[in-house]
Amino acid sequence: MSLPAPRKDRTVIITCSDHRTVPEKFLKLEQDDAVLISRNPGGHVAPNITGLLAFDSFVTIANLLIVHHTDCGTTHFSEDVIRAELKKRVPDRAAEIDAMYLGQIRDMEQSVRDDLAYLHASPFVRQELKDCARGFVYDLKTGLLTAVEG
C-alpha cells in the first residue's frame, strides 16, 4: 500500500496557545481546509522554526500566517522575573538561562514585525515561504484580524 501524494497547497498558522484564540473559529475554517495550526506562548516563529522547516520540506507551505492577539499573557510577565526564578532552581546554569528565548511581548504589532523579520533572516527558509508570510493581530474583544506590515 502506498501513501497518497501530499497536497501542495497547505497553509500554516502560527499563533498563541491561549484558549481564547481559536483560528478555526475566527477564520471560519473547515476540517477539510488544508491548514496546520501551530501554537506556542505568544505565537512566535522562533520556537516553531524547526517544525515549520520540516513540514515545508514535506508538503510545501503555500501560505504562512503569524497571528498574535490582544491581551496576550506574554504582555503580562517579565523575562527578568522568570530568569531569576529559574536561576534559583538551577543556579549553575545561569548562562543558559540568560540565553533562553522566553517571548515577552511589549508591543504587539512590533512583535509580529519581529517574528516576520526572524523568518526573513533565516537562511533555511525558502524565499517563496518568506514571500508568502503575513502577520496579523487578532483583537479578542472585537474579533477583528488586522494585518501588520513587515
Image (cartoon, rainbow, N blue to C red):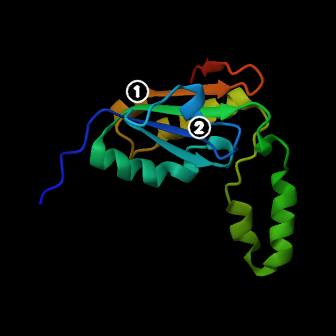
Q: Helix or strand or loop: what does disc 1 sit on?
A: helix
- Decide: few, some or many residues near mark 2? Use Cα within 10 Å; few <14, some 14-19, many ≥20: some
The structure residue drawn at horizontal position 69% and vertical position 22%, both measured from the top left corner, is 143
Left or right of residue 85, residue 60 in this image: left
Residue 106 location (% of width, % of height): 79, 36
Left or right of residue 48, residue 77 in this image: right
Q: Earlier in the sequence, mark 2 or mark 1?
A: 2
Q: Helix or strand or loop: what does disc 2 sit on?
A: helix
- Outermost residue toward the left in this view: 1
| Residue at the spot of label 2 | 115
Q: Label 1 amino acid? A: Asp
Q: Nearer the viewer, residue 132 or 28?
A: 28
| Residue at the spot of label 1 | 131
Q: Are marks 2 and 1 in contact (CB under 8 Å)?
A: no
Residue 14 location (% of width, % of height): 54, 40
Q: Nearer the viewer, residue 104 or 10?
A: 10
Q: Label 2 amino acid? A: Asp
Left or right of residue 77, residue 121 in this image: left
What is the C-alpha distance between the residues marked 2 and 1?
A: 14 Å
The structure residue drawn at horizontal position 82% and vertical position 72%, both measured from the top left corner, is 87
Q: Quadrant of the N terminus?
A: bottom left
Q: Nearer the viewer, residue 128 or 142?
A: 142
- Decide: few, some or many residues near mark 1? Use Cα within 10 Å; few <14, some 14-19, many ≥20: few
Residue 42 location (% of width, % of height): 68, 43
